[in-house]
Image (cartoon, rainbow, N blue to C red):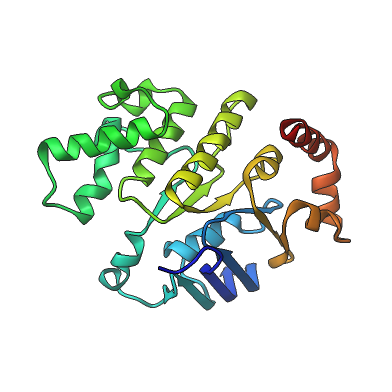
Amino acid sequence: MKGKGEPIIEVRGLKNSFGDQLVHEGLDLEVRRGEIFGVVGGSGTGKSVLMRSIIGLQRPDEGEVEVFGEPMLDREENEAKHIRRRWGILFQGGALFSTLTVAENVQVPIREYFPRIEGQLLDEIAAYKIVMTGLPAETGPKYPSELSGGMRKRAGIARALALDPELLFLDEPTAGLDPIGAAAFDQLIKDLRDALGLTVFLITHDLDTLYAICDRVAVLADHKVVAVGTIPELLALDHEWIQEYFKGPRGRAAATIAKDADR
């Protein structure tokens, strides 16, 4: 088994554009096994486009993407299926199927990859994943419309964990949550990473999340990754956006909360 710290995601020379709009050019990125890796950047810097490029929902103009040491671009769906089975995804808002119950939502990827699993075993796996995220067991038969925003996100995490993934992609996981709910969700992600040995790729604009759980942070600007490091390492850089983002009022407040939590 390969050790913690090896590259899990490698992106080299990535270029994405939409017509005349250039989003990424010459973007390089490396995510290591076992870390919670945050991605930040201003509006329009292509944070979600980057994630979609990695997971195969966006075809880049140029570049290379490897996940678990295997190339992801220009592969047939069946060729990449064994790799996709090793990751889980939480899209913005949870992206649950509204006509399915929470348990049925969790069962969707299991039915796709393991169609022979059915009946009671399928129900037991879904129930276990739901409880794992901190939701009450009675959440399973409910529909997404019957849940709060925070509960829907946890249900989305339960579905993302359905196949026991090694890698978790999270797109703005705390968006729309109140500070208490967001802090609880951050703790859930950290606990799951520690308990399951996950690697987490996390897009966020939430400074509290960056300070609370991210091991390293990548900053997108000027169509590429301009810096990667711990928050103290980023704060030492002379880059206008980084300084404004981390040392502005919200950044200073998040830093204070993080220091208080460490005491």
Q: Quadrant of residue 29?
A: bottom right
Vertical comparison of 180 with 223: above or below: above
Q: How many marks?
A: 0
Is residue 99 something that shows in the picture?
no
Is residue 55 something that shows in the picture?
yes
Vertical comparison of 241 with 80: above or below: above
For image coordinates 66% across by 40% down, the residue present is: 212
In the picture, the quarter occupied by the C terminus is top right
Q: Is residue 137 left or right of residue 54?
A: left
Q: Nearer the viewer, residue 249 or 119?
A: 119
Q: Is residue 254 left or right of residue 102?
A: right
Q: Residue furthest right?
A: 238
For image coordinates 48% across by 65% down, the residue present is: 54
For image coordinates 37% across by 24% down, the residue present is: 145
In the picture, the quarter occupied by the N terminus is bottom left
Vertical comparison of 91 with 70: above or below: above
For image coordinates 79% across by 38% down, the residue present is: 255
Q: Quadrant of residue 62?
A: bottom right
Residue 225 x/y as whole percent: 69, 66
Residue 53 x/y as whole percent: 49, 65
Residue 174 x/y as whole percent: 57, 36
Q: Nearer the viewer, residue 147 or 259?
A: 259
